[in-house]
Structures are given as structure tokens and as C-alpha cells.
Amino acid sequence: MRELIPKDKYGVFVDTKDTARVDSLYVAHYFEKEHKNVLRDITRITDSKSGLSEEFVRLNFEPSSYTNSQNKKQPCYVMTRDGFTILVMGYTGQKAMKYKELYIRRFNEMEQFIKTLVTARKEFPLLTENIKLLHENPKPYHFSNECDMLNRIVTGMSAKQFRQAHGLEKGSSIRPYLTDEQIKMIDTLQKVDIGLLVAVPDYEQRKRYLEWYKTKLLEKTA
């Protein structure tokens, strides 16, 4: 399965459909189980006689594979949060409870990341794609910091502050509420920032360059 955001050390990743998933191989490792036994549990759960609907199985358990140390392709599964929850429901003991909590927290973090990514992709598509190229394992702040910087330079507020000031729903796009001039300025600065991300790693310095560039553009059109 193709990964939009690569697996972290717990095997949690985001697929190209913006869904957080976890690899069964990693679950076996952290819950201290043989992977063949985890596969056996998944086979039992996904059996047509288990009681789960075909739709649930299709959406939450996807067959995949990995290459082992002998360079042989071996089966595994990638699961959604719901699939993972069903699988580990019967895992008991203090260590199992510890890792259930850890994985639930990691899924929460990754799903918050997805929301940040989806919002950034809608409003800053070019910038979002380039951030993913620049960072091997991008974090939510890689997107939110850069997008908020551009919003602050143009509107004087972050997207969150703009929504609060205008009574907009949490997480909604602010773009429909910007003026044509603001949208044009954001799109222009977004393209400039793509180059700066490579040439100027320091956030504050990039911000100063963009503010200077905005001033020059406004002077030109005045």
C-alpha cells in the first residue's frame, strides 16, 4: 500500500486516501506476539462466519506484504483504527493495556495530522506538496506553521483567529471569505515560499523575506 505519510516507529502511517492505518507486523512486535499468531487472529476476525460484515472487513483490514530478512515476500495486514481496535480487544495484561493506550493516542495524533494536512492542501496545494518532498516524515507543524505564517502576513491573523473573528465553523476554509486581493497575495507568496523552504531553512528569516516581498508588491501596485 502506498504511504502518504511514512510509517512511524509503531507502524502507524497515512495512506493516499488520508486514512490512518497500522501494520500488523508492528502490532505483533509491540504486543510481543508471533506475527503468524496475529495473522491467525486477523483471519479468524475476518472470516465470513465471525459476525463482522463484509463491508467492515473490506474497509478496515487490507492484505499487504513485506520482505523479510531472507528477502522473501511475506503476508501482513494494514488496519484502520477500527480494525486495530477489534484485533487487540482480546489482548490482556498490563503491557497489552499500555500499548493499547499508546496506539489509541498515536491514532488520535495522526488523525489530527490528517485534518491539518487536508486543510492545508485545500488552501495551499503547491506548498503542501513541496513540504512533503522536503521532509521525510513531515509533522503537523510543518504544514500549520507555514500556512499560518502566510495567513498572518496577508490577513494579520492565523486561520484559527480569522475563523473566530468571523464566526466561522472550526476547521472550515477561510479562502471563500478573503478578498480577491488577499487570495492573489497568498497565492503569490505561497510560490515564493516554496523556493525559500529550500534556500532559507530558518522560519523567522523566511517570514522577514516574505514580509519584505509583500511590501514591494504593494508598493508596485500603489
Image (cartoon, helix red, strand yellow):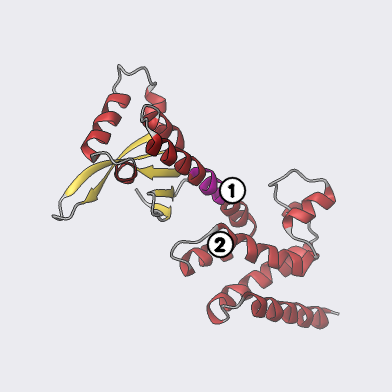
Residue 54 coordinates in the image, percent (x, y): 37, 23
Q: Which residues are magenta?
A: 107-115
Q: CA distance from mark 2 to mark 1?
A: 13 Å
Q: Which mark is residue 128?
A: 2
- Judge left or right: residue 80 versus residue 118: left
Q: Quadrant of residue 22?
A: top left
Instruction: From this view, report whether residue 95 is shown above or below residue 144.
Output: above
Q: Which mark is residue 165?
A: none
Q: Quadrant of residue 184?
A: bottom right
Residue 199 coordinates in the image, percent (x, y): 55, 82
Residue 14 coordinates in the image, percent (x, y): 45, 49
Disc 1 residue type (three-letter): Lys
Name the one closer to the observer, 3 or 106: 106
Classify 10 Å Cα crowding around label 1: few (below 14), some (14-19), many (20 and above).
some
Q: Closer to the observer: label 2 or label 1?
A: 1
Q: Which residue is drawn at the image coordinates 53% and 66% (left, top)?
A: 131
Classify 10 Å Cα crowding around label 2: few (below 14), some (14-19), many (20 and above).
many
For disc 1, the marked residue is 115
Name the one closer to the observer, 198 or 191: 198
